[in-house]
Amino acid sequence: MKVLLVNNRLKASTEVMAKDIANSLIKRDISVVIDEGNGYIDNIDLVIVLGGDGTILRAARQYAYENTPILGVNMGTVGFLSTIELNEFYHYLERIITGDYILDARMLLDVMIYKNGQLYKNNICLNEVVIKSKNHKMINFDVEIGGDKQNSYKGDGLLVATPTGSTAYSLSCGGPIADPDLEVFIITPMAPHLITQKPFILSATKEIVINNFIAGEAIISMDGQIAFELDASFSIHIKKSEHQVLLVDLKQKPFFSNLEARLGRNGVT
């Protein structure tokens, strides 16, 4: 068994814990690699992430292509994507080693960014894609769903979230909470000029195209960690990825059973 330990390199406490866990696993004849930020590491059986949701999002984008299970150990604040808290790790250690857990498959977004009709960037993300104004000016753009033009939007921007991301930025912008077992898009206009443009839920079988950017400076952000500037030469294509993130679930608690507690931890009431 080969385990990759990923920690938040901006927090010394996660680095200390990573070394402690590495020593415990090595004593059990488990091969351990600590992520040093040098790129993808091959032949990993399990990724253990020490940190908050942001650290898990980074690991998810990197290792989802290989269907590598990811165990989140919360050392952040909210911990929506974590299955256990730091003080519970050694209690569950034997189950982690023996694989005595279930895998919670989460939908990913495939985001293709075209510039002048040519593919410019291709990324996956777990939570959301955000297209928004870079400054105080409103931006204009069109949205196509399944090849049909739906609306022209004018405002601060637009957010397309997965059910996993429905409790993150999308929720702060007024979007609904969705069961993560669903495969849908949550589309939320951000401060739209027309108050009739409200959040809605769309089947993930469709493809979303966002184009015809007019006026103002815009950026696209994925999971709040990858960002590019946009202009009229760009078009954004969003669809459900063929890959999934496999989150290790040791407790098997229903999603909505601890939702209120997690939202409260983030100051949401």
Image: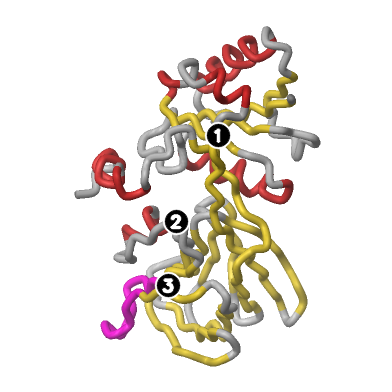
Left of 244 or right of it: where is 258?
Answer: left
Amino acid type indicated by mark 1: Leu
| First-in-chain label (3 vs 1) | 1
Look at the image and give the residue range highlighted in magenta: 188-199
Image coords of residue 234 (percent x, y): 64, 77
Is residue 40 positioned above or below 218 on the image? Answer: above
Determine the CA span between mark 3 and mark 1: 28 Å
Residue sitting farthest toward the right: 42
Callout 1 touching callout 2 (CB < 8 Å): no
Image coords of residue 20 (percent x, y): 57, 12
- Nearer-the-camera pick, 76 or 9: 76
Amino acid type indicated by mark 2: Pro
| SS class, disc 1 | strand
Image coords of residue 57 (percent x, y): 55, 45
Determine the CA span between mark 1 and mark 2: 17 Å
Residue lying at 33% horizontally and 78% vertically, measured from the top left: 192
Which of the two discs, 3 and 2, sits closer to the camera?
Answer: 2
Would you name the residue on which mark 3 appears? Answer: 187
Q: Quadrant of the N terminus?
A: top right
Would you name the residue on which mark 2 appears? Answer: 180
Callout 3 touching callout 1 (CB < 8 Å): no
